[in-house]
Image: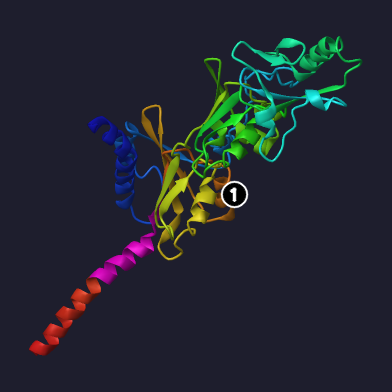
Amino acid sequence: MKTMKLLRLRPFMAVALVLGLVACTDGHVAFPVTEAAQRAVTEEVEIIRLDSSNIASFSRPSRGHSATSLPLGGAWNYNVGAGDILNIIVFDHPELTLPAGPQRSAEETGFRVQADGSFFYPFIGQVQASGRPLEHIRDEVTQRLSQFIPDPQIEVRVAAFNSQSVVVTGEVNSPNRQAITTVPLSLIAAINSAGGLKDSADARAVTVLRRGRSYNVDLAGFLTAGVNQNNPILRDGDVVNVPRRRSEEAYVLGEVRNPDVIDLSLEPITLTQAVTRLGGLDSLRADARGVFVFRQHNGRMRVFQLETDSPAGLVLGTRFVLEPGDVVYVVRSPLQRWNDTITRLLPTVQVVSAAERISR
């Protein structure tokens, strides 16, 4: 536990170390401060001044979308299973069709597929239904019934889908079980039927558990980038899990108008965007030549310095993408440090002067 706390505090310790050295200098902030100060921090801190010649190497590209490896399968066709209730209509032969009425639903008048996969139909006896599409069942019933009725016209429908389903769980508004029907059930349709995604959901990391194997599905790739493979058709027994979005934050501190935490989990955010969203630099207190980003890299602390006192610096900042754990710090201007000193000393001086006048 102590080790974890130390790791979390390291960026802020580095902020204090580097800015402590900066505070010892006069005028605007610049690196290296002095050769001695530079040597004092190089063992723990790597200092990089951002400019047009090196910004490209630190401009992390936006995270792309990858297609899922979940097998899509062939054309969709529903296969009847045990527990389904079939409704069989024989046209012009009402005696073979059990009609539904005010007291009986289509489910109650249908033929239930038993555990062995068959159902009983008058005249022809047991009909094997499990694992077969409706067209095959209709053809068999038609052929066997033709021995008793000339050229029977038959329609076979599913009155209740009870045999197959999928489960949707995780960060959706109404986790539920959904029946597989004759209409293909896509991933996005299943999530919508579960109330849709919560604000805390991570649409990039949806998983589908199928036959003991878990597949990652970047649903955001389908929604925002048109990756059609990432909206697969679900199969019987699939378990869809929408995970909670992991916290990915950067911290903006120092002389900005509204120091706060920036959420990086929804979209890539650049240095200029982060500062702007928090109200921009404090025009009276901030030194635009001293915008720093502290970042852990391979066990060391990297400190990036960006001078934003010109439009060119702000443009460079739009190419520098923040990463989780970054600490952005804007230093105070030398003039403001002087003004703060005067503000603190002036009341004391005024009191002393007043006391001297009274003593006279």
* Quadrant in which residue 122 is drawn: top right
Tell me which residue sits at (24%, 74%) in the image: 346
Q: How many marks?
A: 1
User: SS class of the residue under badge 1?
Assistant: helix
The reply, left or right, for residue 214 in relation to residue 246 is: right
Residue 12 forms part of the magenta stretch:
no
In front of the other: 313 or 127: 127
**On screen, 140 above or below 92?**
above
Residue occupied by mark 1: 315
Please identify the residue farthest to the left as the structure is shown.
359
Q: In this view, does 109 lie above or below 55?
A: above
Residue 340 is inside the magenta segment: yes
Q: Which residue occupies the extreme right position in the image? A: 151
* x 19%, y 76%: residue: 349
Residue positioned 40% across, 63% down in the render: 285
Q: Is residue 154 above or below residue 57?
A: above
Q: Nearer the viewer, residue 89 or 181?
A: 89
Above or below — where is 132 with respect to 199?
A: above
* Residue 28: quarter of image: bottom left
Left or right placement of residue 181 versus residue 244 in this view: right
- Name the kind of residue labelled 1 in the image: Val
The residue sitting at 54% across, 28% down in the picture is: 167
